[in-house]
Image (cartoon, rainbow, N blue to C red):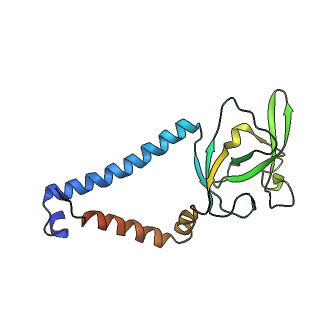
Amino acid sequence: MLSSLFPGKSHREIAHQILNIFMIVTSAFMSWKALSVITNSESPIVVVLSESMEPAFHRGDLLFLTLPKQEPFVVGDIVVYKIKGQDIPIVHRVLKIHKENGEDFILTKGDNNSVDDRALYNKDQLWIKKSDIIGKVKGFLPYIGYVTIVMSDYPKLKYAVLALLIILMFFEKEEN
């Protein structure tokens, strides 16, 4: 059946191409997990989705995160955090740190925003905790993340590009 879809290819060549696709997907997954372990962050790479951190970061910038266990957060750090019940992480700067009973409570604010983030937090939440933080920004590549923004904004384009890549892999000529 598969050989009728790809004339001129043997079953062995088709199986080889399918295994290549599987290897690429699993290698990407393993690399992501290894990077997560090395950086101690569930999401070691994120894309800036809004203009709230301009001029420091722009929409589409790719950020590299770490979450050092022993390194405390200080005012001025740029952190990425998630609010419980919301899917999209937020990239903002630490504005204030309040210590209570040995625990740090953190208030954040976007550089381009006129007020702090309390309106973004859950109802009756005035601070975020260290457990809400995904990572601290350690580096970035400008505008590289626009690819993911475009793919999210136009899902049909994402599937078209993915299909094209798979088709190109199947028709790739291997040289011995």
Q: In this view, does 120 lie to the left or right of 131?
A: right
Q: Compared with residue 51, is residue 102 higher up or lower down, i.e. above or below?
A: above
Residue closest to the far top? 102
Q: Compared with residue 135, is residue 19 higher up or lower down, i.e. above or below?
A: below
Q: Is residue 22 left or right of residue 156?
A: left
Q: Quadrant of residue 102?
A: top right
Using the image as rendered, state which of residue 100 and residue 173 is in the foreground. 173
Q: Compared with residue 10, is residue 131 higher up or lower down, i.e. above or below?
A: above
Q: In which quarter of the image is residue 169?
A: bottom left
Q: Is residue 102 left or right of residue 70?
A: right
Q: Where is residue 109 in the image (x, y as percent from the top left)?
A: 81, 53
Measuring 59% from the left and 40% from the top, which residue is drawn there? 41
Q: Position of residue 128 (x, y in %)?
A: 77, 43
Quarter of the image containing the N terminus?
Answer: bottom left
Q: Quadrant of residue 175?
A: bottom left
Q: Where is residue 87 in the image (x, y as percent from the top left)?
A: 63, 54
Q: Is residue 173 shown to the viewer in this render?
A: yes
Measuring 62% from the left and 45% from the top, which residue is drawn there? 65
Q: Position of residue 130 (x, y in %)?
A: 73, 37
Number of dots carrying numbers: 0
Measuring 75% from the left and 33% from the top, which residue is drawn there? 72
Quarter of the image containing the C terminus?
Answer: bottom left
Q: Is residue 1 shown to the viewer in this render?
A: no
